Image (spheres, helix red, strand yellow):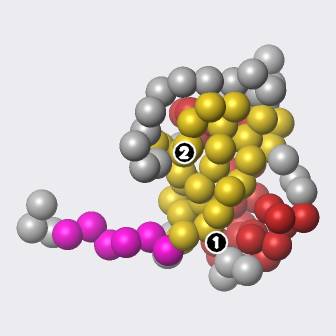
Amino acid sequence: MTWHFERGQHALDLIFKLPREEQFRFFNLLSDLEIDPDLATEGFGLNVPGPVRMRSAPLGTHKAVLLVCDHAKRVTLVNIVRSTPQDPRL
């Protein structure tokens, strides 16, 4: 079964606040999200497995934070956050 990305006004407002290059990266990500959101993203926060979970996708200087729901087969953009650079000492 295919997944559905929620294309509501909230999602569009968040996407259009991104720099243009990152907007293109997000729109290129959409087809992958609707095929397999877990493969197209990485865990976010506590990364608790289950039917409803938070995932993220890097876009450059920002990350898309997504809510994935197995029951409804929906992917919802929750927020866009700034990416933090990795500490080279780790």
Asked whether residue 31 appears in the rendered view, the answer is no
- Counting every numbered tag in the picture gives 2
Viewer-proximal residue, 50 or 61? 50
Is 13 magenta? The answer is no
Tag 2 and tag 1, C-beta contact below 8 Å: no
Would you name the residue on which mark 2 appears? Answer: 55
The residue at 44%/70% (across/down) is 83
Which x, y percent locates residue 61?
49, 75
Going by the numbered disc 1, the residue's amino acid type is Glu
Is 8 situated above or below 31? below
Q: Which residues are magenta?
A: 82-87
Q: Earlier in the sequence, mark 2 or mark 1?
A: 1
Would you name the residue on which mark 1 appears? Answer: 22
Is 84 magenta? The answer is yes
Disc 2 and disc 1: Cα gap in Å?
18 Å
Q: In terms of secondary structure, where does tag 2 sit?
A: strand
Q: Is residue 47 left or right of residue 54?
A: left
Crowd around label 2: few <14 · some 14–19 · many ≥20 (10 Å): many
Viewer-proximal residue, 81 or 1? 81
Which x, y percent locates residue 29?
68, 51
Discs 2/1, front: 2
Is 74 situated above or below 2? below
The residue at 84%/47% (across/down) is 6
The residue at 54%/24% (across/down) is 50
Is 21 situated above or below 71? below
* Main secondary structure along the magenta-highlighted residues: loop
Viewer-proximal residue, 24 or 78? 78
Quadrant (top left, top right, bottom left, bottom right) of the N terminus: top right
The residue at 57%/36% (across/down) is 53
Residue with the most extreme left position = 89
